[in-house]
Every structure is written in C-alpha cells, then in structure tokens.
Amino acid sequence: MTSIREWKADEYQKSLGFVPKLATKVLEWLDVKADDKVLDLGCGDGILDIEIGRVLAQGGGKLLGLDRSPSMIRAARENVRRKEVGLERKCLFIVANTSDLLKHSAMAHQPEHFSKVFSSAAIHWMLGSSSGSSLDDDGPVSNRGRKFFEGARYVLKKGGKFVFEMGGMGNIAEARAAMVGVVARTLKQAPENIREPWFFPDEEWVRDMMEVKVGGFEVERSEMEWRPTKIDGRGGLEGWVRLIGDKLFGLIRDEKEREEAVREVVRLLEIVCRREPAREGGDVEYVVNYVRLRVVARRL
C-alpha cells in the first residue's frame, strides 16, 4: 500500500492558507453559542477554531479539534495560544484519524457528548480512498460514508447539529481530470484504476447517507455553490497542485517521473485556469472551479 504523507502546517499555509478565509458562511450556519460543546473534524491549523473559541470564552463551552496531521495539531495549539490569551483553556487539539471516530478511544467513551459537530473543507478527504489505487482497494465510498457518519451520530447529542462544508460534485474538476489522467498514463494504468483521495458528493447522496443508510439524522438545510476561486497562496498554482495532488503523485515511485507528472499537470492548468489581466500590465491569475456543499443536519 502506498504510504500517506501527512500535510505540514507550513506547506498548508503557503499553498492553501486562503481556504479558511472563505469559510464565513459555514461558520454562520454553525451559529455557535457560548455554552456549546463543539467537535471540529479535520481542524487543520486551528484558524477557524479561534473564531469559535472566542464565542465559547463567553460561557461554559469547550472545543475539541481533531486532525490526523501532527504538524497541523501543533500549529493549531500554537495559533490558539498566540492569538488570544486564555483561549487554549477552551480549545483542545488531538491527533486522530477522523474517518472512523469509533476507533478513537477518546470518542468511544463520549456518547452524545457534543452539541455541535463541525467540519470545513475536510470531509471530502475523509471519504476519499486512502490508498489511491484499485490495487490497494479500501472498499466503496458507501462503506467509508457509513463509518464516518455513524461516528458523528454517536458523539452528537440528540437535538444537536452536524454542520459542515466540503467539496461538492464537480469540485476542482479540471484539476482532477489533469491529475488522474497524467498519473494513470505515467503508471500505464487505466484512469478508472486510479482511486482519488477525495470524494465530492451532491446533496442527494449526503441526504440518503445521513437519513437512510445511517439514520438518526434529519438534513434541515443544504446547498451547493459554484465558487470560482483564485489560487492566491504564496506557493502559487504549482504549490496548490503539489499539495492537493500529493497523494496521487505519490503513487509514482520514480522521483523523476513523479516530478515530470507534477510539471505536466501545472502546465495543463496554466492553460485552462488562466485569467487574463483586465488591464494592460496587470498580473495573470489562475482560477479553479470550486464547488462547495454545505449541510446542517439535526441528530434525532
């Protein structure tokens, strides 16, 4: 099985640091109250948790952030400590595999503990294939979806809310097509044999999974939003491609071939994602077609 390299906080800040800045709407939907007990799945470097923690600091609320990357968890602890005096007493961060909460000992002993479960720009990774190749198949996405949402249901109080934003159907489609095509050709595999590390569903799939297959949830609100997004991290388009496609490119064991694949994908996206400057002498920008899926579901 291909090993999975965890994201580093500095790489994330360089190439994807703009992502939390675009999460204002899902935070509004979360509607944090001062006494909420919040579980953040895939908390990353904790930037959004600072906003949540400021509300919880006004009452008896607490936040637990989980992420599988030790580097991200260290950054989250440091960001919370540095940004606001005393906020670290409200926010705890733990390294954990959030794809299956019931395997985590801390979660297994906390049934119906949280009033809010939250996630931003992370669930599509949790539901994606962990292996990347059909040769190392980790089962259909329906199995991964059941495990994930059953875990969320287990830790959520009755009447509590699961509020999340993730990539929706059609998200970064041009980048996915380029990456899968180039990696498949390099490996001399059919494209359908390359299992993507992401899964981008639509509203119907989420509703069926939560209300029917898993049960115990009622989807109260959902929406899909097409959001063309300028890649404006310090790493530029190349940094974005390297980080987003890291798991796919990692299937190519030969270093030279892997680097050639990265550069080919970057060249393709420089063509299809290029936005010409509006005025002479302006900077060329690169815009990727993000599609966001937002959901508010109540625990029955």
Image (tube, grey):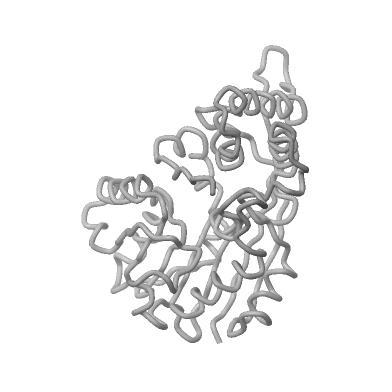
**How far across and down, in percent of the image, does residue 148 sit?**
54, 69
Left-right relation of 155 to 198: left
**How far across and down, in percent of the image, does residue 153 sit?**
51, 79
Which residue is at a point 75% across and 70% down the rendered structure image? 204
Which residue is at a point 38% across and 80% down the rendered structure image? 113
Image-quadrant location for residue 67:
bottom left
Which residue is at a point 61% across and 80% down the rendered structure image? 214
Numbered marks: total: 0
Q: Judge whether 213 appears above or below 233 on screen.
A: below
Q: Judge whether 212 appears above or below 273 on screen.
A: below
Left-right relation of 265 to 156: right
Q: Judge whether 261 appears above or below 199 on screen.
A: above
**How far across and down, in percent of the image, does residue 217 sit?**
60, 81
Q: Quadrant of the C terminus?
A: bottom right
Which residue is at a point 69% across and 29% down the rendered structure image? 265
Q: Nearer the viewer, residue 258 or 94?
A: 258
Image-quadrant location for residue 66:
bottom left
Q: Nearer the viewer, residue 53 or 207?
A: 207
Q: Nearer the viewer, residue 150 or 295?
A: 150
**How far across and down, in percent of the image, does residue 124 sit?**
60, 56
